[in-house]
Image: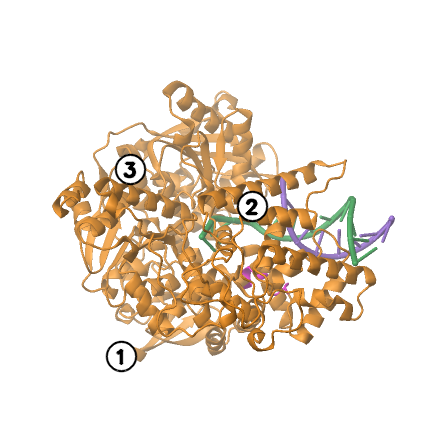
Chain colours: A orange, B green, C purple
Amino acid sequence: MRPTTSDAAETLLKGLTEPQREAVTHQAGPLLVLAGAGSGKTRTITRRIAYLVAAGGVAPGNILAVTFTNKAAGEMSRRTMQLLTAICPRYASAATVSTFHSLGARLLREFAPQLGAPAVPNILDTADQLKVVKQAVEKVGLSAEHFPPPRVLHTISGAKNRLQQPEAFAASAEGRRDYFHVQVGRIYGAYEELLRAAKAVDFDDLLLKTALLLRDHAAIREQLQDRYRHLLIDEYQDTNHAQFVIAHMLALGHGNICATGDPDQSIYAWRGANLSNILDFEKYFPNAKVVRLEQNYRSTKTILRAASGLISHNRMRKRKALWTDNPAGARITLFRAADEHQEAAEIVRRLRDFHDRHAVAWDQMAVFYRVNSISRVLEDALMKAAVPYQIARGTEFYARKEVKDVLAYLKLLANPDDDLSCERILNVPARGVGETSTGRLAAFAAGQRISLLAACRRAAEVEGLTPKASHGCLKFAALIDALRRQFLEPAVRSGDPPPGPDPIDTAAEPTQDGTDFAATGSPSFGTGGNRTVSAQAGDPADPLFDPVLATASQEADPDAASTEVDMPPPPSAPLLRRAPVARILEAVIDGAGFIDKAAHIDEETLQRQSNIQELINVAAEFDRQNPAATLADYLQQVALVSDVDRLRDQSGAVTLMTLHAAKGLEFPVVAIAAVEEGLLPHSRVTNSDNGPRDIEEERRLLFVGMTRAMQHLLLSYSCYRMVMGRSEGRVGSSFLEEIPKDCLEPVDLMELERPAGSPGYRDNAVYLPRAHRRREPSPTPPRRGSTGAGQERGAASRFRSANASWASRAAPPPTGVPAAEAYIEPRATGMRHSLRSGLLVRHPTFGLGRVAEIHPAGDKTRVMVDFQGRGRTTLVLPPAPLEPVDGE
DNA sequence: GGTATACATCTTTTT
DNA sequence: GATGTATACC
């Protein structure tokens, strides 16, 4: 019997605080939940989704929740489902829970026909992107020396996140006469050209293209607004402009958008996150309800007080009071170790102590660090102590060469136009097709306007190819074609009846594949206004017909329907059979000869082979969990795994991860290693001209790490650390002195080695750098790599200078309004009101500048700014992203 | 054209 | 300390 609405509501509100209840019961219209660390945010969101269904009568299929990782999506989906099942099994279908990137990938595939976009795009990882950028740099006649691909890519990525396409980017670069940006504008154009030709998209495209799809196609936008009538977006403080546009486009009309987040936990500004998305939420949605969750249920009073003390040093910040009813708990242990080995060993010793003497399970403990390289020494120590551990490095596995090679075969099978994948594996395993041959083939392909794979089939016609190379190409093409024949439907002649449903791939059906947790009801696609896709490919009315793959046939061979005659080997209707991915993988590995059956196998080959085996195992698991999934689904899922996605909760192992990856998680025991000046805050930040802004993000990073801890927190640093082979003198992070002293229990592991009579750790307060502050900063950087006592001095002065420059930046502004207020001013429209001439401002690309003149003119207010080293520049004000800078 | 070796160059954080 | 690149040799 279905419970009454009030029964269900009652159940869902049980045990909630008043603010949480408000968030859960808010019905229609925009809602902003400002949720402090550990304030029960996830609980509130899952209850809210369930409440919308149970009490609000919203169909689960009409709810879209966006989370930060696939793991979080899975978690939220599971918990919501649990709630709904508990109330009434009748409700038990999940809402769509997805990351922005997965959502984008899925929508782009769904609407590929309308967009003329690739049906199975190759989603590039960062390494792939860098290769393409490098090609693009060379293509426009520049050198990678002057235009380092990482820097260029970062610039392009920034443009994409602001929805700036090559033309717009180039135009704005021209306008400001910035040589680097003007050239990047050209590279950006070439880069896009290369991606388009290879039917590839990068991570940023998944957002940019989705934002444009929604912005520029009214019919699609309305269709999706109707599909997703309630929107919930988590970690809103870390959304960038593209994500902001996607959210707004979806929420347009119904306005049912619930954003949750915490400005103090914004740690992704470096990849385009725009804090004003959350800070100005009420400006974008003037009727928004705002709920604040400030009671912390996670941490002890001590941990919370320490974290609050730290974060209170951020001046560009809305004041917020986190409090807790939890017990005071133990003090935070702060280790100072001689070197990273001692540090790691001591962390592990403490963890073992918790485990052995206090019955804390291994999976209740985690170690965080700022940079991945720290994990190595921790792993060694854990291994030595026989402590089980897991490490959040999901992407690393898929970045391995042999894994990428095998996956490239799958990509090429799914999309024969994927020249990047084709080029990657053409000679893997070796077939006698070297660089020169590949170049000739590519030139031939370009001349004939065919894909690289097609060029391989016609290798005999390519001039200058050695017999060996030509043979290799033909062998390769034959292999791919054989695999396609085996796993794809054979070409269907025009006039033949549409293929039957059973062997046809049905990629459009969302699946529970660990990437998207979709509603059980199948989404409506291809409704009114759709052009009919060519008859040979299938019937759009057939629920099993896949419009995505149907277009693949069109893309591959636009004239197929009319001139279906020549070239028998390539199937012209590449409808993928729904074969288990693991089986396709095995066929690829077997056919290509990845497993070398030679008698003598060295260590490295063995490792490679076991990685390939692991790939098959993971794929088999994917097949088991997603029986309806297609090859395209698999490739999408694999491309979008995040580092934490592969972590298991009941692992029985200590978890290692970066501070960035730790967001949203919690552990009873947390250790944060290498809390050192230069690492946290990172030297790239302390030395950057972006000044206090970046330092504050580093501080938030430590804040995020500390607030993951429930019962016990350990912080540590080393006095010497191997960096790039050399031993470097190090000192504790300046952030450590911002933690209230009585929260800390300093432990000096070097104490034993201290010569009798010399000042001890606690006495001379080396870990508290304040003592050094008053001295003059050393004018010359300390030498590194020296030994003995000299190194100790080197470490101290190194710290002193780093700290001095940091301290001077953080000094309070001499006059004027408090910085916090200026910062909270809206950037987009209201900004001009808080500008005044003489104000120091920051522009994301121009850097620091001083306002010279302001010419108010409504929407087109112009501001003249004197930028450092660039001279006077005119900016038009709503769009110009100017930030006031506090201090000097 | 393929492969092995030395060497040089970075190292933030990630979907 | 590991990855890519340049060079030499097969």
Residue A462 visible: no
A789 with respect to A814 (left or right) = right
Q: Chain of mark 2?
A: A
Of residues B5 and A209, the one drawn nearer to the viewer in this rendering: A209
* Residue A582: mark in rendering: 2
Where disc 1 sits, the SS reads: helix
Label 3 vs 2, first from the N-terminus = 3
* Residue A304: mark in rendering: 3
Q: Within the magenta stretch, is there residue A506?
A: no
**What's under tag 2, amino acid-wise?**
Ala
Q: Within the magenta stretch, is there residue A146?
A: yes
Are circles 3 and 2 on residues that touch, CB within 8 Å? no
| Label 3, label 2: how far apart the Cα atoms are | 47 Å
* Residue A395: mark in rendering: none
Task: Give the magenta range.
Answer: A144-152
| Label 2, label 1: how far apart the Cα atoms are | 61 Å
Q: Quadrant of the N terminus of chain A?
A: top left
